[in-house]
Structure formats: C-alpha cells, structure tokens
Image (cartoon, rainbow, N blue to C red):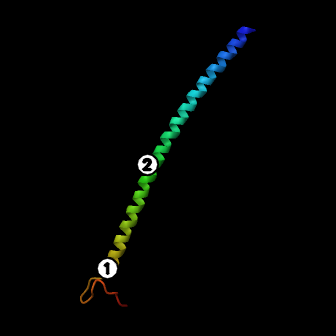
Amino acid sequence: MLSTVSENNNKVLMMTAISRGHLLNDWYTVRNNNSNVQLWSLVLCFVIIATSLFQVYFVRRMFNVHGAGVRSTSKPRA
C-alpha cells in the first residue's frame, strides 16, 4: 500500500513539473507576442502620421496658386 502511495506521489510531482514547464513556455510566448504587437503598433502609428503629413503637403501644393498677377497670399477667384 505504501508503494502505491509513493508511486502516485511521484506521478503527481512529475505532472506538476511538466505543468510548470508548459506554464513557463506559455509565459515566454505571451511576452514575445506582446513585444511584437507593441513594436508593430508603433511602426504603424508612424506610417499613418507620415502618410497624413504627405497627403496634407500634396493637397496644399495642389491648391497653391502661382500665376501672373496673383499673389501667394491672395485667394483664388472663381
């Protein structure tokens, strides 16, 4: 009877060690995924800001009037 209790105890300890190993593996995976998500989020924020500035520059350039007798500060007339 003591031998079966000892065997069951050893099985429980082995399963606990395996479970802890899986837990650590999952924890490192979560940390790595979090780092990757934060990095790509920052990169995409910079891309969106750069694209917005690029678009504003070209829209302003498109409506910028340079012609004979027209000052750059005067409003275009219809």
Q: Where is 6 relative to 47, above or below?
A: above
- In the image, what residue occupies the spot 43% across and 48% down? 39
Q: Quadrant of the C terminus?
A: bottom left
Label 1: which residue? 64
The quadrant in which residue 3 appears is top right
Q: Where is 53 relative to 69, above or below?
A: above
Is 73 left or right of 21, judged from the image as shown?
left
Residue 60, given in percent of the width and then of the height, sits at 35, 75
Tell me the crowding category of disc 1: few under 14, some 14 to 19, or many 20 or more residues within 10 angstroms, Cα based: few
The quadrant in which residue 20 appears is top right
Q: Where is 74 relative to 9, above or below?
A: below
Label 2: which residue? 39
| Amino acid tagged 1 | Asn
Residue 66, given in percent of the width and then of the height, sits at 27, 82
- In the image, what residue occupies the spot 31% across and 79% down? 64
Mark before the other along the chain sequence, 2 or 1: 2
Q: From the viewer's perspective, is the residue at label 2 or at label 1 nearer?
A: 2
Label 1: state its secondary structure.
Answer: loop
| Amino acid tagged 2 | Leu
- In the image, what residue occupies the spot 68% across and 13% down? 7
Is 58 left or right of 9, judged from the image as shown?
left
**Mark 2 vs 1: CB contact within 8 A:** no
Is 58 left or right of 18, judged from the image as shown?
left
Label 2: state its secondary structure.
Answer: helix
